[in-house]
Amino acid sequence: MPTILGQNQYGKAENRVVKITRDGDTHHIKDLNVSVALSGDMDDVHYSGSNANVLPTDTTKNTVFAFAKEYGIESAEQFGIHLARHFVTSQEPIHRARIRIEEYTWERIATSDANSKFIGSDEVRHSFARKGQELRTTQITFDGENWEIISGLKDLTVMNSTNSEFWGYVKDKYTTLKEAYDRILCTDVSAAWRYNWTSDEDRMPNWEKSYEQAKKHILQAFAETYSLSLQQTLYQMGSRVINSRSEIDEIRFSLPNNHHFLVDLEPFGLKNDNEVYFAADRPYGLIEATVLRDGVEPRIPVDMTNL
């Protein structure tokens, strides 16, 4: 049977680049995991093996490191924009570039030695510890004219020890779950949000500020919502971001319900007054949904929350 080539892309995945910016004795770290995917006139390499239109993946790797030096890394988004523009505009066969970036964040190590020459405001200026809160993500796509920037985070673990209920649900003969009127609500937040910035001519968002503000609104909505379901909390988190950040049109969440079950202590003659729980890591409920600005069509791929 005759066959034809479908959608295809190639590139170098997971290029770990660490950029140290030295401002006198004060150092700054940007630690990225960069994946490059290119597509365009690539039929011949698949059909005949001709590499005439192929930019080696090793070259894309080298470009990542060279650009870290040439342009610096102001933000994951800005760095990805530099890379995507370069690949599409410098190589005629390449029509589309997708840059996916994970950012590992670091914080300065505090010290009690007030006499150290390296110390300012009780922090060592060149010593850092990896922050364990979340992994920042972004995907930059450029087709020569328009940009699509989808940023987000994953593995941000949050918990409310009260102000959460779950009751009034459908029951059948297989239902054993007891209704809960005061439960722990815990989840690992994975979120991806799409910016409405699409043209190099328009005013770019402040990527660093936008990320911090989006994260802040997600956390505040989680903490401030009296939850009757994780779905309700998800919607409040998304609504808070959309209503507070004009540069964001769409946000998608994937929220596992990290179940905490009350332990039966009666066999030991003890009363468990919502104090002792068993944290079950699997199986878990998985709640996923997208929250959109009114009138906006959804465009975030489902897999974006799993970058």
Image (cartoon, rainbow, N blue to C red):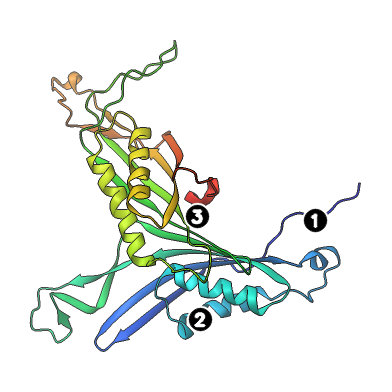
The local crowd at label 1, few if under 14, some if 14 to 19, many if 20 or more residues have their Cα within 10 Å, is: few
The extreme bottom residue here reads 24
Asked whether the residues under the numbered discs 3 and 2 touch, taking CB atoms below 8 Å apart as contact, a structural biologist would say no
Comparing 201 with 242, the one in front is: 201
Q: Does 229 appear above or below 216?
A: above
Q: State the CA–CA distance, disc 3 to disc 2.
A: 23 Å
- Number of labels in the image equals 3
Amino acid found under the numbered disc labelled 1: Leu
Comparing 225 with 112, the one in front is: 225
Q: Does 291 appear above or below 213?
A: above
- Tell me where residue 145 appears, x and y as whole percent: 61, 68
Dot 2: element: helix
Q: Quadrant of residue 166?
A: top left
Q: Quick one: label 1 or label 2, which is nearer the N terminus? A: 1
- Tell me where residue 78 appears, x and y as whole percent: 45, 71
Comparing 200 with 29, the one in front is: 200
Comparing 287 with 13, the one in front is: 287
**Residue at x-position 13% and y-position 76%:** 121
Q: Quick one: label 3 or label 2, which is nearer the N terminus? A: 2
Q: Quadrant of residue 161?
A: top left
The local crowd at label 3, few if under 14, some if 14 to 19, many if 20 or more residues have their Cα within 10 Å, is: some
**Residue at x-position 38% and y-position 73%:** 30
Q: Quadrant of residue 90?
A: bottom right
The residue beneath circle 3 is 307
The residue beneath circle 1 is 5
**Residue at x-position 48% and y-position 62%:** 197
Position of residue 232 in the picture relative to residue 91 (left or right): left
**Residue at x-position 34% and y-position 48%:** 243
Dot 1: element: loop
Position of residue 244 in the picture relative to residue 196 (left or right): left
The residue beneath circle 2 is 67
Q: Quick one: label 3 or label 1, which is nearer the N terminus? A: 1
